[in-house]
Image: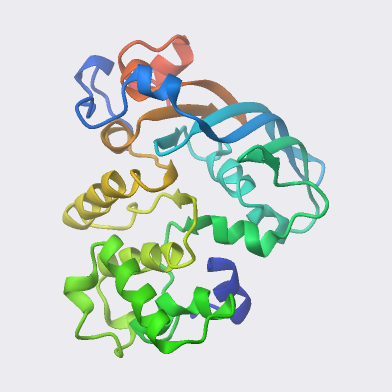
Amino acid sequence: MNLPTQNEQNEAVGISNRPIASISTTSTIARSSDELAAARSKISVSDLDFFYGVNQALFDITLKVPEHCVTALIGPSGCGKSTFLRCLNRMNDMIEDTRLTGSVLLDDEDIYRPRTDVVELRKRVGMVFQKSNPFPKTIFENIAYGPKVAGMRKRAVLQEIVEHSLKQAALWDEVKDRLNESALQLSGGQQQRLCIARALATSPAVLLMDEPASALDPAATARIEDLIFELKDNYTIVIVTHNMQQAARVSDQTAFFFQGELVEAGPTNTLFTNPEKPQTEDYITGRFG
């Protein structure tokens, strides 16, 4: 198993062939169109272009991410979803020879302004990666890592943070008697929830998720999806997923990307049942992907 380096530890602080109308959406749980329209924008992206060297990966992206909602990013592999996601907390800064133009506002502040404290930004905008990446430490130390890096040393306070974060990630009852055991002993689904708890330990406002359930079995996937529903009352969530049904189940807003462009975005129920663009309909119904 490839263990994360110290730098990586610091950084961490299915197409359907069915018709659109048959894809189930959770309209009883998802925010309504009116609620989405009334929601304050937590993140506002305007005219964003992104380059890997001379190769442009994103073209003129403009998207608003409403507060306390789940926004799903869908599209075929290589369309720019994950690149866009990493733009929202400047994770792409770690890649050499990249360049971004346009603006990304978090609470009306441009995160790409010259004096931005990137470490502080990533506390406010946490990230959960596709592959669970627990540190080779105890369960307790995994969750306490971020607060310790931020300067918290009081054991009693760290214990409170660890318990609260594990409860938020629906993992406390499963591990409360095992906090001093290695996190690597947990199952795949438990490890992913541990990584979610670790991200929550720094009290972010936004949680970015890059295909968090793609490597999990159906039962573990359901746990992650249930957790997303619970977390959106307190956090703004942006999730990349290749699973059309998952996007329909968990999100309030969906954005469809293709070849680096944002084709269409809107309330999930509307986008899946009555898309404006023929290209969106073709993708959702499985005509390409």
Tell me what residue is drawn at x 81 percent, y 53 percent. 97
Q: How many marks?
A: 0
Q: Is residue 162 left or right of residue 51?
A: left
Quadrant where the image shows the N terminus: bottom left
Quadrant where the image shows the C terminus: top left
User: How far across and how far down the image is residue 13, in percent?
Assistant: 53, 68
The quadrant where residue 10 appears: bottom right
The quadrant where residue 242 appears: top left
The residue nearer to you, when weighing 277 against 142, is 142
The quadrant where residue 188 appears: bottom left
User: How far across and how far down the image is residue 54, in percent?
Assistant: 82, 42
Tell me what residue is drawn at x 64 percent, y 32 percent. 45
User: How far across and how far down the image is residue 226, in percent?
Assistant: 22, 48
**Residue 144 visible in image:** yes
Tell me what residue is drawn at x 45 percent, y 10 percent. 278
Q: Is residue 180 above or below residue 160?
A: below
Q: Is residue 248 above or below residue 134?
A: above
User: How far across and how far down the image is residue 234, in percent?
Assistant: 37, 48
Q: Is residue 173 left or right of residue 47?
A: left
Q: Is residue 234 above or below residue 81?
A: below
**Residue 286 visible in image:** no
